[in-house]
Image (tube, helix red, strand yellow):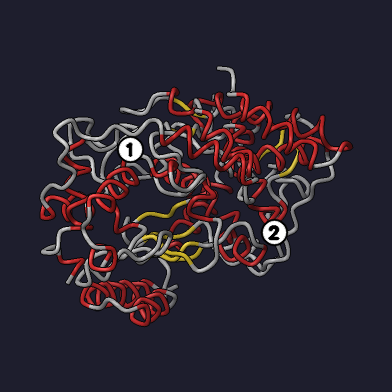
Amino acid sequence: MKPSTLLAALAGIVVASLVWAQASTTDEIAKYRAALQDGNPAELWEARGEDLWKQKRGPKQASLERCDLGRGAGVVKGAYAELPRYFAGADRVMDLETRLVWCMVQLQGFNEAEAKKTPFGSGSDRKSDLEALTAYVTSESRGVKMNVALTHPKELEAYRVGEKLFYYRGGTHDFACATCHGEDGKRIRLQDLPNLMTAEGAQKAYTSWPAYRVSQGELRTFEWRLYDCFRQQRFPELIFGSDGAIALTMYLARNANGGVYDAPAIKR
Amino acid sequence: MNPAPWLRALILGGAIAAGCATTAGDKEIADQASTVLKASFKPAGQAGLDRLDQDDTQRACSAAAGKPLPHDVAAQIEQANLATIRYPADGKLIGDWRNGEKIAQEGRGKQFSDDPNGPVGANCYACHQLSKGELSFGTIGPSLYQYGKLRGNSAEVQRYTYGKIFNSEAFAACTNMPRFGYKGILTEQQIKDVAALLLDPASPINQ
């Protein structure tokens, strides 16, 4: 996208935001969402991520171009549509973000703590390389059907653990994922909630992350989505790259199988 | 923590219903999920890891996994929760609906990102329609518009309404609604104020 087009798109978002502030009907929100689709600042994250992927970085001065995301060293096309998956070298089921950290450690020589120091960005002061890399890799699966396998016993195990976590009630408010995402056609305030217990709902939701969040001015990854849902559930803080985060991602990604991947997207 | 006998019966019943071939696997996965869960969170702000510890109600409702409960189990959950309800010592169940409206709008409270000394609301509008004038309402719970107008303001209705806010599980096992009094989310006065929002004839929801 040319800078002028992007500026026009951003101006459109501002106008649309004002329209939205005055309107209250679902129709107006649908119009606002349609207007957002005209230009997506997520492209800035995708471009930065592609640079990061190709740059020689870290103590070993290596690029990530030999990183195996599951379809062979360096294959990015379609990789995200098959994640999470079991990786023999790590002997672990990994989602994309965890795999990127693994490659930064193994190929580029970063230490693990350093590689995952900033999982989520916050404006221009605190940019997240992981967000940018995630935006780039996911964009290379756009138009590909979700096809997550449960062939390895650890993949099946992660799926089943993820299912248990989906229904796990806890905290001060007794909330589970299923509290908000277990019925069709529900909303919280005016925000529509996908029913993640149906194939259609899981497909629609999962294939639209990462997303540029207009309200936050930030590209948000699927790990962020889980992190912030748990915050609102009044749980403690979900650890980035934890087995719980990966198991839930496995459960939702697998349930989205057959859906056409279409992100990074743009959301309110 | 040992589950109550009725809960043990439910978990065992679920395992049998799931079929012999998967029984052992289900138990293993449930144990593993519990281990994974504890290793996947860290304390943050006011939210410690104790928030992951389940009470019997949370455990039974998680095990049900969105499916309807057997009637006897549902009745046991409701009885156990009913026994927790504490009514105000002064016998007054109705406060100020104006404060109730503020509490119903307030979404902050108990999140790790919230100031522990800041406001704690009930966020009723996240899930319910209440006042006609507020168009930004959710639909996870039923509409409460004209709640009091439809039910009247009798002592029985007041008692039910206060109790429902205090511990919703006493009246509908495995409801999505939090137990605002029992879990210490709202104070006694706040519950009175929310009850007023629902029942006071002058409240905007009863217009």
Q: CA distance from mark 2 to mark 1?
A: 39 Å
Residue A45 screen position, x and y as percent:
45, 56
B62 or A87, which lies in front? B62
**Residue drawn at x 51%, y 34% as measured from the top left:** B57
Chain where mark 1 sits: B
A11 or B109, which lies in front? B109
Answer with the quarter of the image where residue B148 lies.
Answer: bottom left
Answer with the quarter of the image where residue B127 lies.
Answer: bottom left
The quadrant in which the N terminus of chain B is found is: top right
Label 2 belongs to which residue? A77
At label 2, counting other C-alpha atoms closer than 10 Å, the crowd grade (few under 14, some 14-19, many 20 or more) is: some
Q: Residue furthest top?
A: B1
Residue B194 screen position, x and y as percent:
21, 50
Label 1 belongs to which residue? B111
Q: Amino acid at mark 1?
A: Gln
**Residue drawn at x 23%, y 40% as measured from the top left:** B120
**Residue drawn at x 67%, y 46% as measured from the top left:** A250
Task: For mark 1, give the secondary structure.
Answer: loop
* Residue A120 visible in the picture: no
Q: Is residue B106 left or right of residue B43?
A: left
Q: Amino acid at mark 2?
A: Lys
Q: Is residue B167 left or right of residue B79?
A: left
Residue B165 screen position, x and y as percent:
31, 45
